[in-house]
Amino acid sequence: MNRQDKLSEHFTVAELIRSETAERKGIDNMPPDILLPKLKRLCVEILEPIRLHFGRPFRPNSGYRGIDLNREVGGSRTSQHCKAEALDIEISGISNYDLAVWIKTNLKFDQVILECYRLGEPNSGWVHVSLKDPGQENRAMVLTYSHRTYSEGLLA
Ligand SMILES: [Zn+2]
């Protein structure tokens, strides 16, 4: 796998693994080749439909995180980011609440979490979305994460 490899029409490996923390700390965040189909799946089933619908280019804030990077950013030990099953997304000019609602309504997913969103500030926070492998059950869980607490549903 190379950074420049295309995973789908609009997304490359580099965009799915980029991390300011990894760059700053000199962490190699290149995934093992075995995760390539999973990265592609995130692009084809989540990122491309979002790009098509909202009609503007964006790069995920966070996609794959190797163990070292995940530890550095304080991610959960069981984070789906480490399995190439999760993305954190925000799109310039689009409310993160609206983005979460659209994903919930239109895409297949394991979890959608509206994270750190504040009412009246459309650009606050981000949307975490995850998707499991074919054959594994996707739980279709919809949550809001705020003040270190998870609540059911999308709360604005
Ligand atoms: Zn996330």
Image (tube, rainbow, N blue to C red):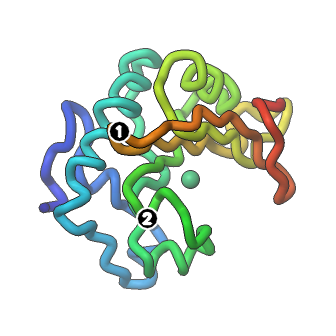
For the point 65% across and 22% down, the residue is: 101
For the point 37% across and 55% down, the residue is: 84
Q: Is residue 20 left or right of residue 142?
A: left
For the point 70% across and 46% down, the residue is: 115
Residue closer to the observer: 49 or 150:
150
Residue closer to the observer: 84 or 132:
132
Determine the image quadrant of residue 24: bottom left
Crowd around label 1: few <14 · some 14–19 · many ≥20 (10 Å) = few
Q: Which residue is mark 1?
A: 135
Residue 40 badge: none
Determine the image quadrant of residue 53: top left
Q: Which residue is mark 2?
A: 82
Residue closer to the observer: 86 or 20:
86
Q: Amino acid at mark 2?
A: Cys
Establish whether ligand 1 lies closer than 8 Å to the Cβ of label 2: no
Determine the image quadrant of residue 154: top right
Q: Is residue 90 left or right of residue 154?
A: left
Quadrant location of the C terminus in the rendered image: top right
Image coordinates for residue 86, horizontal then vertical, percent = 47, 49
Q: Is residue 38 above or below residue 55?
A: below
Q: Secondary structure at mark 1?
A: loop
Q: Amino acid at mark 1?
A: Gly
Image coordinates for residue 119, horizontal then vertical, percent = 85, 33
